[in-house]
Amino acid sequence: MRAPTVIIKFCAVLLALIALVTGGCSGTSSATVDDKSLVLVAGATGGTGRALVRNLQAQGYAIRAFVRDEAKVRVVLGDDIAYATGDVRDIATLHPAMQDVTYVISAIGSSRSDPSNNPEAVDFGGVKNLANAAADAGVRQFVLVSSTGVTDEDHFLNKQFDNILNWKFKGEQALRASGVPYTVVRPGGLINTPANEFSVVFSQGDTLAGRISREDIALICIAALQAPDALNKTFETSNSDEPGENDWASLFAELEAD
Ligand SMILES: NC(=O)c1ccc[n+]([C@@H]2O[C@H](COP(=O)([O-])OP(=O)(O)OC[C@H]3O[C@@H](n4cnc5c(N)ncnc54)[C@H](OP(=O)(O)O)[C@@H]3O)[C@@H](O)[C@H]2O)c1
């Protein structure tokens, strides 16, 4: 396994400095609003991860992508991205990646094509490693992309793929036990459609079905970073079939804490 490397490019440092200066001059009384501190995106080269990186960049956040494959990061995320290489199964690679990180968003997921990168190792073990490393580093908030259906032990996906949802649920529990403030976002089936095409539904109790755009999931995860009402909450989400604006603050405020 490759030794961990943290490569911070000049432009990313510049972005962080600009974010610091503009945040400092905003005159807001809230510590979280306009806070563009460093976000570690785990699974940044995946489908949801790419949407996260793009939208975080658009919103002016400082970003560090956590990636397995240095060549892939260039192809997928371009040249102007700060990144750390490692593997969530290897906690030693996570500690350097967490240096100076304020927020973590995880969109990692196991691979059907690689038996060693299975749900137990990644969706449980990897999330647990990430959460514990984040807690050790004093991370302010950890947003986890999980899934609907994780509390249904008999869900057909458990039979199709190595108990994936059961392991995802254990990953959620490991995050809650880590002590780091968190938000667990449980999407329905992920689709590659534009953001804000349809309004979004939030639900609790793990009864929601449906599908949701990866772009909308990215926006929800990023909005959670700015919302005290999203802290220590778990919810399911899917697209409705109605067009409409999403008021993230109101949606978070209606949720019950865990
Ligand atoms: N697909 C669905 O319909 C659906 C529905 C609900 C929830 N979800 C969940 O939503 C999340 C995002 O899904 P997605 O389809 O956007 O993800 P994805 O495209 O499969 O991307 C997964 C990411 O995890 C990374 N990864 C895998 N193993 C890793 C390891 N050992 N160490 C570090 N990184 C690792 C991958 O790295 P590489 O790029 O190097 O491969 C990739 O960037 C996942 O947790 C998924 O299970 C998916």
Image (spheres, rainbow, N blue to C red):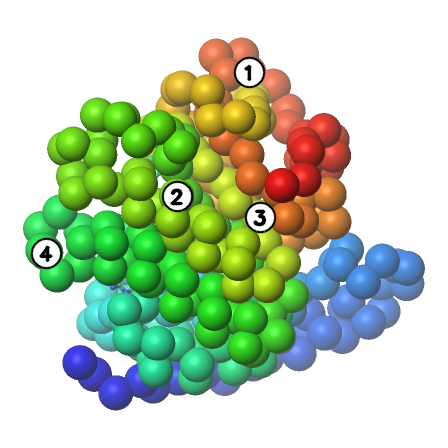
Give how far apart the Cα atoms at labels 1 and 4 are.
Answer: 39 Å
The amino acid type, in three-letter code, at marker 4 is Asp
* 111 with respect to 255 (left or right): left
Between tags 1 and 2, which lies in front?
Answer: 2
State the image quarter where residue 142 is shown. Answer: bottom right
Between tags 3 and 1, which lies in front?
Answer: 3
Residue at figure coordinates x 16%, y 43% from the top left: 162
Which x, y percent locates residue 217? 47, 39
Number of labels in the image equals 4
Q: Which residue is mark 3?
A: 183
Among numbered discs 1 and 4, the one appearing first in the sequence = 4
Among numbered discs 3 and 1, the one appearing first in the sequence = 3
At numbered mark 3, what does the secondary structure look like: helix, strand or loop? strand
Give how far apart the Cα atoms at labels 3 and 1 are.
Answer: 26 Å
Q: Which residue is mark 1?
A: 243
For residue 114, the mark is 4
In the rendered view of the protein, which quadrant contains the N terminus? bottom left
The amino acid type, in three-letter code, at marker 2 is Phe
At numbered mark 1, what does the secondary structure look like: helix, strand or loop? loop
User: Cβ(mark 3) to ligand 1 < 8 Å?
Assistant: no
Q: Which residue is mark 2?
A: 169
The reply to whether discs 3 and 4 touch (Cβ–Cβ < 8 Å) is no
The amino acid type, in three-letter code, at marker 3 is Thr
Which x, y percent locates residue 203? 56, 25
- Closer to the camera in the image, 217 or 76: 217
- Closer to the camera in the image, 67 or 257: 257
Between tags 2 and 3, which lies in front?
Answer: 2
The reply to whether discs 2 and 3 touch (Cβ–Cβ < 8 Å) is no
Answer above or below: position of 219 versus 79.
Answer: above
